[in-house]
Amino acid sequence: MKGNESQGLRTWAEISIAALRHNAAALQAHASSGARLWAVVKADAYGHGVEIVVPALNGLADGFAVANLAEASQVRALAPEAPVLIMGPALPSERAEIARCAFLPAISSQEEAAGYAACAGVHPVAVHLAIDTGMGRIGVWEDNALATFKTIAAMRGVEITGVCSHFPVADDDATFTRNQSERFGALVEVLREKERFTGSVHIANSAGVLGFTSSFADCYRAGLALYGVSPLAEYQSLLRPVMCWKTCVILVRDFETGRGVSYGRTFIAPKQMRVATLAVGYADGYRRHLSGRNAWVLIGDRRCPVLGRVTMDQIMVDVSDCPEVEVGAEAVLLGSQGSEEITASALAELAGTIPWDTFTGIGRRVTRLSVDVGNAPALREQRARLK
Ligand SMILES: *Cc1c(COP(=O)(O)O)cnc(C)c1O
């Protein structure tokens, strides 16, 4: 229980390399045979730490997908050989660097294509043309896709090496998604037959690859599932959670009946209680929305309810039933301990949000540590090095 005390860490997230690799392999086994994986590692690998995740998946994933140029450069430094797809539009001022580094930008317009063409060196700049088939975010509208494709294909200095789209409701509207997938598939067929397009095709996110088949696509972009959370509950058993987010007890005190806990005094001790103060707050990503929502943490393999409001740097939990709890004890905020588990989906739901938001909201104060399941010595060593 006092394992972490001597190591000087207060709040940290243990990232299982073995689970990450398991999930990548599970997705590959589940996807249409031969489909390639773009591992989505935007937003610091969904808060898991890009420096841990990219090396762990290098070689297993066929490439890495990110949101912007800064993230692409980070990935390049970690996996110099791997293709890097930038899924969102770049600023005009970023294009020269993207072309120079041979990152693969997804573009939405002929203006962007012309911008990249102007940055071309000896070779044309390879781009993927994003087509909006229902997401309403980026891409050329479906009805203009063929015309835009033709215009760009005729430009010098730029080459369309792929076309892509995105599912907005693959996790909750199968009818829309199937129809959307068919429309995109039909469009791809036209491009292949009429425009002699031979490039790559992708549309599926995690929910898409788990729940739907798109035989016309040769790759998919998975994020959340890699981190062990299935957007479709029926596939959860294929995946293993990757993160265990922990903090420690920094104080234990006895509360007399009638004493209030935290800002707003929204919780008043109804009886004598033991209350532990933990080294985590909303500044670390433990959402303030978890206040008064019957959230709990795990200490000593037991559920300890969060009392009162979440503050910036600390939360208070009820440890009346855990007399052995002392300063330095480990508390699990997300993940498992003993036979208990707090899933990212459950924590997100309590906070009124989604697991993507919960993961990416985990703050910079939280140290990310890579750990192989059951590999305690390596973890201890890493923590000691960090001291
Ligand atoms: C973030 C993102 C993904 C990954 O989505 P998951 O649901 O996490 O798998 C895929 N494609 C695009 C365009 C994205 O922005």
Image: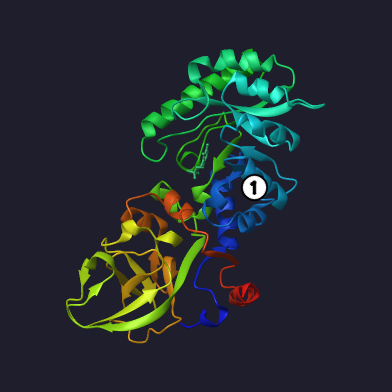
| Residue at the image point whose x is 67% and y is 56% from the top | 55
- Percent position of residue 77, x then y: 72, 50
Name the foreground residue: 143 vs 155. Answer: 155
Residue 198 seen in this snapshot: no
Considering the numbered disc 1 on the image, is that residue within a helix, a strand or a loop?
loop
- Percent position of residue 365, x then y: 51, 63
- Percent position of residue 57, x then y: 64, 53
Figure quadrant of the C terminus: bottom right
The answer to whether 276 appears left or right of 51 in the picture is: left
Count residues near mark 1 (Cα–Cα under 10 Å), then give few for <14, some for 14-19, many for 20+.
many
Name the foreground residue: 269 vs 167. Answer: 269
The answer to whether 307 appears left or right of 46 in the picture is: left
Q: Quadrant of residue 122?
A: top right
With respect to residue 220, does 145 lie above or below? above
Q: Which residue is mark 1?
A: 61
Report the number of discs.
1
| Residue at the image point whose x is 74% and y is 48% from the top | 80
With respect to residue 130, does 291 lie above or below? below
- Percent position of residue 17, x then y: 60, 61
Indicate the amino acid at tag 1: Ala
| Residue at the image point whose x is 60% and y is 33% from the top | 90
Name the foreground residue: 57 vs 91. Answer: 91
Residue 374 seen in this snapshot: yes
With respect to residue 378, does 283 lie above or below? above
